[in-house]
Amino acid sequence: MLIVVMLLAITGARVVLDGKRNARNMRDLDIAFQAAEAALSDAELDIEESPGANTRSHLFSPQSAQGFAIGCNTGTGDNTAYLGLCLPSSDQISVWNEVDWDVTTNPRTVAFGTFTGRSFQTGAGAMPSRPPRYLIELLIDRSSGMSADEQRYLYRITAIGFGPNGDTRAMVQSVYRKSNR
């Protein structure tokens, strides 16, 4: 009888510890997802017209494409405004799968606030371990009702957010059309 009671107590303790671990992992994933969503918002502001001094919204014309490079531009040298602007490769490999999101020296992705001047809080506890990052991929707009000679562009934004544990990541993606102002 004593062995049965002991086995029940051990099983109960294990269930409680597993529940706690699962709750912590879900919290970390939620924080990473919220950070990735913030990066999407930052990228949309980057495309439209950011209030920051480093604005590059003029590069995102619905009719022309400047600074986009196959596999993503690193923005080194005189082309710092082209950081994170990507063209799909000819073999249609997903750009966001090929980019190293952890690189900080000559990265191909944009850190939150680089072109918008916004800040993102990171730290210990229930804060993301580092700022989220994003890249912007140029897509041809194939909307119905457009003439064959008319070419317009859309932008696929891929963003990654990090949780309190640096290994916890969430990636989100959206397709964005610049407003016609």
Image: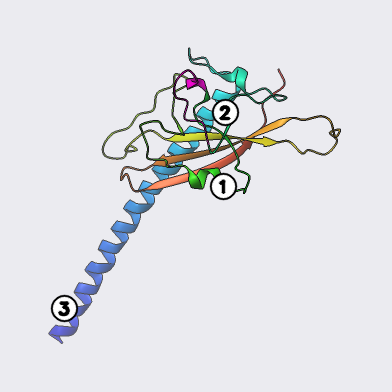
Rendering coords of residue 142 (x, y %): 77, 39
Which residue in the structure is indicated by mark 1?
94
Depth check, mark 3 against mark 2: the one in front is: 2
77 inside magenta stretch: yes
Which residue in the structure is indicated by mark 3?
6
74 inside magenta stretch: yes
Tell me how many marks there are: 3
Marking on residue 44: 2
What amino acid type is highlighted by mark number 3? Met
Q: Residue at x 48, y 15 (%)?
A: 54
Task: Identify the element where label 3 is drawn.
Answer: helix
Q: Where does the C terminus fall, quadrant-wise?
A: top right
State the image quarter where residue 102 is shown: top left
What amino acid type is highlighted by mark number 2? Glu
Residue toward you, 176 or 96: 96
Earlier in the chain: of badge 3 and badge 2, it is 3
* 20 lies above or below 55: below
Which residue range is magenta in the image?
A: 72-81
Earlier in the chain: of badge 2 and badge 1, it is 2
Residue toward you, 142 or 20: 142
Q: Residue at x 40, y 30 (%)?
A: 106
Residue toward you, 91 or 130: 91
Residue toward you, 71 or 81: 71
Q: Residue at x 61, y 17 (%)?
A: 58
